[in-house]
Amino acid sequence: DGGITQSPKYLFRKEGQNVTLSCEQNLNHDAMYWYRQDPGQGLRLIYYSQIVNDFQKGDIAEGYSVSREKKESFPLTVTSAQKNPTAFYLCASSMQVNANTGELFFGEGSRLTVL
Amino acid sequence: GNSVTQMEGPVTLSEEAFLTINCTYTATGYPSLFWYVQYPGEGLQLLLKATKADDKGSNKGFEATYRKETTSFHLEKGSVQVSDSAVYFCALSELVGRRALTFGSGTRLQVQP
């Protein structure tokens, strides 16, 4: 089935450790996105990538890093510089720009808890 | 910049009641508008969308009309079910630049039998 796969679903981390969240899509979408969800705050954009080997900061990029070496993959690293990393992280993708009405397709999410 | 404002929840209704969740937006240009639904512990699923003024999006008994004059996209359903209990997000697309979605803060709906 086509879709977006995020892993792990749950992750626990000690303070001071980096952690990488995986996001893989087989929808042949060009653009991929990472959002952070906190209770009562909706979703906030961390990073996005519209094409392979290129990515841009979103609204809350500090303490995060990404790579886009393959079209299918857009991993997110939560570094020790992120002051409040406990959150629910959502990966999304969308069709190429010219055919895009703006709809994003989301994965199931990864819940990160810092102990 | 772009922003989306939703009514705060939780909204608690009895089964078969009428539902309205208000959503207003601020945007440059003419964005597409969306409602997404999130069930506990899951990602977001697209519920419905509208791409231009006066369009009505509909799905699973839910409807929303793109009102440019009032910059609104209110979600309605005539008769809710317990299975509709979830968090609902209103969002608008940025059709230039980032082409990301800007989300409202979400409204939790609880439907009681």
Image (cartoon, rainbow, N blue to C red):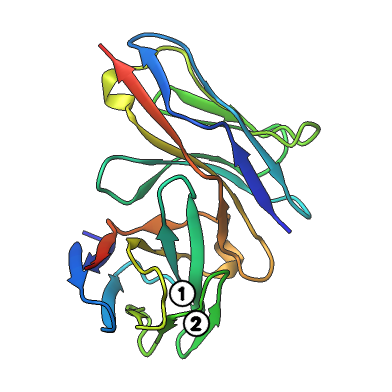
Of B17 and A85, the residue lying toward us = A85
Residue A72 picture quarter: bottom left
* Mark 1: few/some/many CA within 10 Å (<14, 14-19, 20+): some
- Horizontal arrangement in the rendering, residue A81 relative to residue A103 (left or right): left
Residue at left 40%, top 87%? A67
Q: Which mark is residue A51?
A: 2
Residue at left 27%, top 56%? A108
Residue A17 picture quarter: bottom left
Residue at left 48%, top 49%? A42
Same chain, labels 1 and 2: yes
Q: Secondary structure at mark 2?
A: strand
Residue A97 x %, y %: 58, 68
Under mark 1, the amino acid is Asp
- Horizontal arrangement in the rendering, residue A81 relative to residue A20 (left or right): right
Marks 1 & 2, CB-CB < 8 Å contact:
yes
Of A91 and A61, the residue lying toward us = A61
> Which residue lies under the disc numbered 1?
A30
Does any portion of residue A41 appear in the rendered image? Answer: yes
Q: Earlier in the sequence, mark 1 or mark 2?
A: 1
